[in-house]
Image: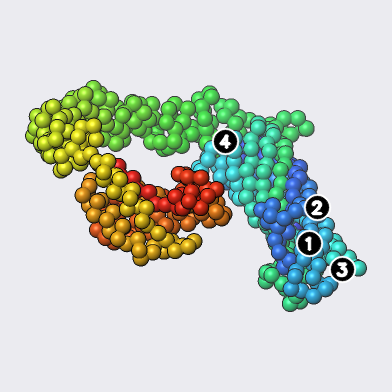
């Protein structure tokens, strides 16, 4: 019974709202708005959801709405929309015919509701170009639906529908704007998609069927004071856009911004009107035309390099805490007197060797000017800052390290030839341990030298497998040496597979030479 009377109730309610609105104060001469819109409908129900453009195809809709200004924060509205809605899905776990679930429906709905506007001169200016809002409506919907795998159409002449959403009104002029909006519509009907919650087959959501309508519309604003059409123009003595009937300040100055009741607009409430206020959104002082001086040093924040800390005009509003002539905002050592050319920091000499730390290659160890502040710990003529072997005398030509003699290199090469592995394996043969121990002894004689271990194979077999095998063998040798007293930090291992042969791989002898492990000592 209530559903049958719903259209009459909606029309009566809209008439009452509009009649009552005429008794309230207005701040907009164009207090009616008619919108034409078009957009996309997206389904949500027991079959699933297509919200957020998650499913295609999308179904189109069109609509018209009539809005009436009530207060700076609220509008009343009536909307009428029509369009298609659909959804199709295959449910693997369901038996046929329910396996192929879907529908296509035509929805025509009228709704009455309210719009809350953020551009109400309290949150945002009523003259803002982009004006966000929230919207809620209630009404009825006519449903005409064709359900997949069912021969008959389903109809519901008048189901209850409620909606809520948000949007943006983009203002072009007093008369025209564009509206971008998304509304979530809940139908209080759970069957027009062919999948009611109670059927126990297609159920995914315990809810009635719903849909979203994303729309783009054009709005024409008209009404009292809009001119033309025989509409009476209300008197506005001070021409501030607020008729005398609703104007609490009837003598505002020409071209001054006013609020919703016609008084000088002072957004930041600092006693300086927005028209005269250079900082209308922040409380300020009259001496700075409405702009603030947060640290109260007599320099307004926009010209103050240190707006939160009181300073002097000499340093553009910044203090000089240590009195070294470098303001704190530029001083890297603001609590210690320093030099201007060092950004306010002193020149320390930590080791007391006569060289400032910024010129000293060894700022924590006393040295000589000749050594750029460094000592020559091993007395080999190479100062520590460039000596790779600081505690072992060496040659200048070898970064201060001792020369690795040719006979040592030959011993290393000879020992390396005696390293053998199990076939196609990285397991070192026991017979190789003697030579590996010799290598460890030699390497311990050069404790500052770094050792590069390189694994190589012949050309037999797969290239990638050979590369992997050579790496694993080099790693195995590294692990052996590390376990026999050689610091792991000195050792690196690399596998090169068959890429660096030292002999021809066409002969057995050549292949044997190519299956090797090389050792390279460097500083």
Query: Foreground mark, 3 or 4?
Result: 3
Secondary element under disc 3, as helix, strand or loop, is: loop
Q: Which residue is mark 1?
A: 88
How many neighbours does mark 3 have within 10 angstroms: few (below 14), some (14-19), or many (20 or more)? some
Secondary element under disc 2, as helix, strand or loop, is: strand
Q: Which residue is mark 3?
A: 149
Distance from label 3 to label 4 (Cα)?
52 Å
Depth check: give the residue in front, 506 or 486.
Answer: 506
Tell which circle, 2 or 3, labels the residue nearer the N-terminal end: 2
Residue 115 in percent (x, y) is at 63, 49
Above/below status of 461 relative to 121: below
Tell which circle, 1 or 2, labels the residue nearer the N-terminal end: 2
Describe residue 388's horizontal placement relative to residue 139 as left or right: left
How many neighbours does mark 4 have within 10 angstroms: few (below 14), some (14-19), or many (20 or more)? some
- The image's mark for residue 83 is 2
Residue at left offset 83%, top offset 73%: 96
Figure quadrant of the C terminus:
top left
Let me know if residue 152 appears in the view: yes
Query: Foreground mark, 2 or 4?
Result: 2
Above/below status of 273 relative to 411: above
Distance from label 2 to label 3 (Cα)?
22 Å
Q: Which residue is mark 4?
A: 128
């Amino acid at each position: 019974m209530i559903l049958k009377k719903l259209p009459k109730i909606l029309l009566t309610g809209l008439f009452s709202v509009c009649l009552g609105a005429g008794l309230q104060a207005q701040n907009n001469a164009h207090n009616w708005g008619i919108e034409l819109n078009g957009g996309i409908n997206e389904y949500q129900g027991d079959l699933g959801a297509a919200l957020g453009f998650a499913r295609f195809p999308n179904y189109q809709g069109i609509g018209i709405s009539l809005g009436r200004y009530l207060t700076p924060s609220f509008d009343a509205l009536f909307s009428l929309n029509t369009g298609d809605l659909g959804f199709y899905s295959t449910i693997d776990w369901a038996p046929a015919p329910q396996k192929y679930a879907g529908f296509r429906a035509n929805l025509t709905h009228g709704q009455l509701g309210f719009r809350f506007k953020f551009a109400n001169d309290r949150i945002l200016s009523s003259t803002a170009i982009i004006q966000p809002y929230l919207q809620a409506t209630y009404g009825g919907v006519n449903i005409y639906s064709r359900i997949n795998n069912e021969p008959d159409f389903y109809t519901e002449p008048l189901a209850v529908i409620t909606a809520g959403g948000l949007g943006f009104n983009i203002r072009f002029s007093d008369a025209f704007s564009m509206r971008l909006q998304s509304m979530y519509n809940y139908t209080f009907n759970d069957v027009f998609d062919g999948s009611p919650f109670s059927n126990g087959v297609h159920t995914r959501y315990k809810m009635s069927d719903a849909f979203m309508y994303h729309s783009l519309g054009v709005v024409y604003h008209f009404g009292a004071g809009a001119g033309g059409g025989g509409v009476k123009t209300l008197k506005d003595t001070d021409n501030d856009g607020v008729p005398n009937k609703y104007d609490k300040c009837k003598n505002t100055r020409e071209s001054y911004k006013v609020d919703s009741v016609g008084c000088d607009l002072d957004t930041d409430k600092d006693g300086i009107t927005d028209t005269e206020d250079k900082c209308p959104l922040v409380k300020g002082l009259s001496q700075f035309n409405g702009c603030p001086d947060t640290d109260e040093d007599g320099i307004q924040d926009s010209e103050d390099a240190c707006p939160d800390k009181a300073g002097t005009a000499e340093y553009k509003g910044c203090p000089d805490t240590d009195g070294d002539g470098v303001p704190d905002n530029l001083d890297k050592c603001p609590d210690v007197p320093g030099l201007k050319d060092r950004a306010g920091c002193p020149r320390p000499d930590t080791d007391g060797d006569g060289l400032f730390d910024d010129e000293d290659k060894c700022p924590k160890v006393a040295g000589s000017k000749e050594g750029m502040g460094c000592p020559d710990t091993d007395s080999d003529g190479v100062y520590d800052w460039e000596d790779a072997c600081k505690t072992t005398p060496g040659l200048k030509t070898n970064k201060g390290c001792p020369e690795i003699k040719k006979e040592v290199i030959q011993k290393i090469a000879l020992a390396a030839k005696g390293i053998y592995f199990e076939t196609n394996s990285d397991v070192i043969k026991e017979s190789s341990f003697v030579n590996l121990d010799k290598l460890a002894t030699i390497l311990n004689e050069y404790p500052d030298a770094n050792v590069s271990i390189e694994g190589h194979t012949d050309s037999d077999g797969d290239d990638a497998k050979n590369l992997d095998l050579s790496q694993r063998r080099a790693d195995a040798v590294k692990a052996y040496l590390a376990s026999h007293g050689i610091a792991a930090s000195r050792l690196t291992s690399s596998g090169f597979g068959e890429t660096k042969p030292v002999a021809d791989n066409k002969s057995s002898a050549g292949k044997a030479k190519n299956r090797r492990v090389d050792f390279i000592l460097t500083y």
